[in-house]
Image (cartoon, rainbow, N blue to C red):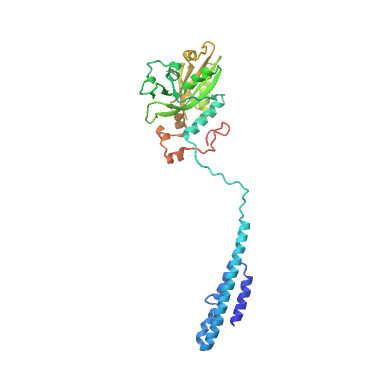
Amino acid sequence: MPKQILKNADEKIKIASTLASLEEVRIEFLGKQSALTLEMKKLGNLASETRKKVGEELNIVKQEIVKLIAEKQISLEEKELEQKLIEQKLDLTIPARTRRTGSIHPITQCMDELICVFAQFGFSLKTGPSIETDWYNFTALNIDEDHPARQMHDTFYLENGEVLRTHTSPIQIRTMQEVKPPHRFIAPGRTYRSDSDMTHTPMFHQIEGLAIDKDIHMGHLKYIISEFIRNYFESPSMEVRFRPSFFPFTEPSLEVDIRRNNTSSWLEVLGCGMVHPNVLKNVNIDPHEYQGFAFGLGVERFAMLKYGIKDLRQFYEGDLRWLKHYSFTSYDVPSLVGGLTR
């Protein structure tokens, strides 16, 4: 009887093709209801000598079945692993998925958008130093000696008498000195003023623009500003208003207001005007031959209006929650064709 059990078990173990079917064989021949277990239960009814002999035979059969099942299990596991490797093969020639890491700060995004808009009107980029002399920052721009902007409470003065530039207009002076007109460029960059509250920070960003040629007039200025604003806010029907104002370096000077979504209130967004003849004289350009316009805007101001940011100071607090909410991915590249923002 034990030999017959072993023979039957061996045959079924050999034909088992999966781990599941092998487990069924194990239960059939080694389980509580198996023939082998039932034979062992009968040992108590046998004589002492017969019990010992039959018991040894049954143990040998059990050990042999356990050995056969273990060997078959190893074989089936190797077979299943090979099959998985074939079915789930990793193709190393396929490029890895792109992982988007980092983000673009709203100020950087806004700056890129503004530059993109002005580029369509032919404005190039100019840069200059953050530390300027009094002449470049004030005098050359027709700012009087007693003008409030020169006071200590508005301007950061250095020990050698130089200043941290209060606007990017010195770049305009340097460019007009170095290159003969015509000119058409914008000057983006950091600027510094001694002020700090919800709408002012000691360091902020500006973009100032300049166009100088022989036939430029106020109509050109109003067209550029109106189209720039509507393009930036992506609102062709946005209302734009020009109001008389005063700046030492332009004459006449204008403040520009916008009104969105048919609201009753106007918002001031930038200043502009025709370049003052004295400024042209200071850089050896004949104001009777050349004229032009200039404008200046705060990048943070435009970012706040477009992205719905309420407090200027939040731009510089480094709050990761705020950055996660307002930042842009590196794939949000401004384009007039594809849209300035996502």
Q: Quadrant of residue 266?
A: top left
Residue 110 rendering spot, x and y as whole percentages: 49, 32
Please indicate, yes or no, whether residue 118 appears anywhere in the rendered image.
yes
**Residue placed most toward the observer, 53 or 307:** 53
Q: Quadrant of the N terminus?
A: bottom right
Residue 284 rendering spot, x and y as whole percentages: 51, 13
Q: Quadrant of residue 270?
A: top left
Q: Residue furthest left?
A: 153
Instruction: Name the residue rendered at 56%, 17% in the picture.
Output: 182
Numbered disc total = 0
100 relative to 87, above or below: above
Please indicate, yes or no, whether residue 236 appears anywhere in the rendered image.
no
Residue 341 rendering spot, x and y as whole percentages: 52, 35
**Residue placed most toward the observer, 214 or 259:** 214
In the picture, measured across the screen, residue 179 lies left or right of residue 257, that is right
In the picture, measured across the screen, residue 97 lies left or right of residue 305, that is right
Q: Residue furthest top?
A: 288
**Residue placed most toward the observer, 9 or 293:** 9
Residue 173 rendering spot, x and y as whole percentages: 49, 19
Instruction: Name the residue rendered at 54%, 28% in the picture.
Output: 117
**Residue placed most toward the observer, 238 or 340:** 340
163 relative to 75, above or below: above
Instruction: Name the residue rendered at 59%, 73% in the picture.
Output: 68
